[in-house]
Amino acid sequence: MSNFLSFRITAFLAIVLLTLSSCKSIEDLPGGDARKNPPDPKKRVKKNLEEGRGFRLDNALKGGSGKGGDFMFASANELWRASLDTLDFMPLSSVNYSGGIIITDWYSDNDSLNESVKISIRFLTNEVRADALDIKIFYKKCNQVASCKISQKTGSLLTELKKEILSKAAIYKKQNKDKNFKPYKGSAVKQD
């Protein structure tokens, strides 16, 4: 019995030593050795960004390109804004800007409670053009017994919806362009 007890103690100590020896030193931990990192937080952030150990949310706004890529915020995307404005009367089920999709919930007006419509809009590009949107419209028709049939429809509603979104997006794009227009100081344009 004493051999078994000594074996267990030896095995336990070996496991503890292996565990402790595999621990990282303080220099390897995040934050590391304070002697090697600047105490000023702004300098630490700058050092981490130079080493690629962080991200900045304002990188896209400044026009820079970092490791994470450039992202345009939703308020600056004319198609996105126009789509949300066009669908503002419908409840939204899922909205994902980074995934480029808007899905409404089932909607029906008070006149036809047994018929509902659901719209999904997928953004294929940020450019304001006809092939930038993939719009799908689904109709759900139910009878009195709650047996429903769902079908995808194409036609005038799809065309009108796409036309409405694109025209609003074109207006937003023109407004942004006019707002950001700054005439060249050396030009003959008179400024007040």
Image (spheres, rainbow, N blue to C red):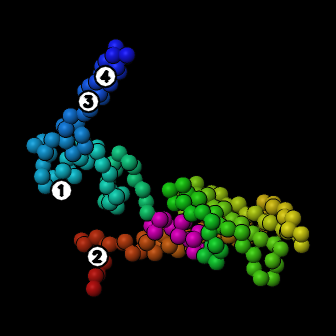
* Observer able to see residue 49: yes
Q: At 13% from the left edge and 45% from the top edge, which residue is drawn?
A: 34
The residue pinned by badge 1 equals: 42
Asked whether 188 or 26 is in front, the reply is: 26
Q: Quadrant of the C terminus?
A: bottom left
- Between disc 4 and disc 1, the foreground one is 4
The CA distance from mark 4 to mark 2 is 91 Å
Q: Residue 191, position in %: x, y?
A: 28, 82
Callout 3: SS: helix
Does residue 132 appear in this view? no
Residue density around tag 2, few if under 14, some if 14–19, many if 20 or more, within 10 Å: few
Please give the range of residues in magenta. 74-86
Give the alpha-carbon distance from disc 1 to disc 3, as whole Å: 34 Å
At x 29%, y 28%, the residue is: 16
Task: Out of 7 and 94, give the one closest to the viewer.
Answer: 7
> In the rendered structure, does residue 81 fall within the stretch colored magenta?
yes
Residue in the image at 32% along x and 60% along y: 58
29 in the magenta segment:
no
Q: How many discs appear?
A: 4
State which mark lies toward you, 1 or 3. Answer: 3
Inter-mark Cα distance, 3 to 4: 16 Å
In screen coordinates, is 57 left or right of 124? Answer: left
Label 3 sits on what residue type?
Answer: Leu
Residue holding disc 3: 20
| Magenta stretch secondary structure, dominant | helix
Label 2: element kind: loop
Image mark for residue 188: 2
